[in-house]
Image (cartoon, rainbow, N blue to C red):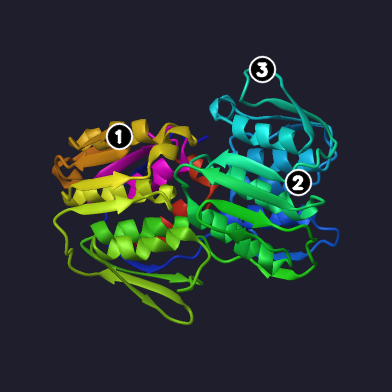
Amino acid sequence: MTRSIILDKHPDLSGQVVSLPSSKSLSNRALMINALSENPSSLLNLSQARDTQLMSSLVNTPNEVIDVHDAGTAARFLTTLFSIKGLPKTIRGTERMHERPIGNLVDALRTLGATIDYLDKQGFLPVAIRGFSPSGIDTLTIQGDISSQFLSALMMIGPSLKNGLTIKMTGNVGSRPYLTMTATLMAHFGATATVRNDSIRVPAGRYLATEYLVEHDWSAASYWFAFVALAKKAEVFIPGLKSVSMQGDRIVVAIMSQLGVASAFSSEGLRLSKQAVDVDSITWDFSGCPDLAQTVLPVCAALGIPGEFKGMESLRLKETDRIFALQQELGKVGATLTGESGYWKLTPGRSPADFKSLSIETYHDHRMAMGFAPWSTLTRLEVEHPDVVQKSYPGFWDDLKNLQK
């Protein structure tokens, strides 16, 4: 594994992004639905991200021991899939994956009739799935602020249950756009899921064979918005991105319009260019788009724009503790990120341009690498362990090199 990569200062960017992956979220859901279908569909343009390639290799594996490595989506979806199918499987992952809670999902699957044992710490991987005997229960009550992947996984198995499934959500519901995405994708394959304010209803049914073309990934595209925001001059074209998308991270267009990025859609894709920054401070709720926090906060810190944010609680339980990681790396330019009662305040320090060079640690987290890479428009930047981008955007560094010519 490459220890680090040096990004020389490049204040100007121009050209076309050529390796933007298709949506990891949509790809993994399509693979899950396909595995639940009696008649497999034709899935086109699946993501080349490591997580999706792993999910694809494991979804129909005959192996009884499953290693999901650091893929959270695969861990949640495959635990649910193998449980509903009653397949004896042991699911394990990396040390960090064993620290990410899965108890709420396991409790729900047990309620539906799954026999699942913890092999180490209660509420965490590794787990052993022993079988499934339908309990007849068709209503679950679950905290709405848990991982949307738990809820999406349960939604997708709903049509396979005799009486369908009703999920009642308590408290604040986070990452709601991901639930809407799941429902929309299920509809494409012939199933029905209705998402309301505090409940989800999935009638019994079956998935139909069809063709599905996965759209490009807005989470991955968000980093080019960040580069344009910080560049002195920039014009970047991203082919294939559509104005209408199922992905909640499409909201990056609205966020970055405040931070100096103009977006122009055409039939071929999206063109990004510089425009004036029109805010002195920014307020945003990341509840529906938590993956964008690591894109937006480094931009605000670099531009000297203070911010107040909410909806970031789930960042504690990702590939790393992303709140801690952001605090550490933003601190290298004197910026602070402090939180109280669910609200987070970003106070800028100095600009990265004030430093001859900076070094960024990535904490085994792909989004830390890509979220801070735009600082290279302002200073020479060393990024530790750059290979982490393989998780979601394998061609990221090549795309950056092409835009810096």
Q: Secondary structure at mark 1?
A: loop
Where 64 falls versus 139 (above or below)? Answer: above
Residue at x 58% of width, y 51% of height: 49
Looking at the picture, how far across and down is residue 241, in whole percent? 48, 70
Q: Which of 280/311 is in front?
A: 311
Residues shaded magenta: 360-385
Counting residues from the start of the chain, the first of labels 1 and 2 encountered is: 2
Report which residue position mark 2 lands on.
59
Using residue 74 as the reference point, say whether residue 133 is left or right of it: right
Callout in the foreground (3, 2): 3
Q: Amino acid at mark 3?
A: Asp
Quadrant in which the C terminus is drawn: bottom left
Report which residue position mark 3 lands on.
120
Mark 2 packing: few (<14 Cα in 10 Å), some, or many (20+)? many
Using residue 108 as the reference point, say whether residue 148 is left or right of it: left
Q: Amino acid at mark 1?
A: Ser
Q: Secondary structure at mark 3?
A: loop
Callout in the foreground (3, 1): 1
Q: Which of 313/94 is in front?
A: 313
Q: Is residue 50 visible?
A: no
Q: Secondary structure at mark 2?
A: loop
Q: Amino acid at mark 2?
A: Val
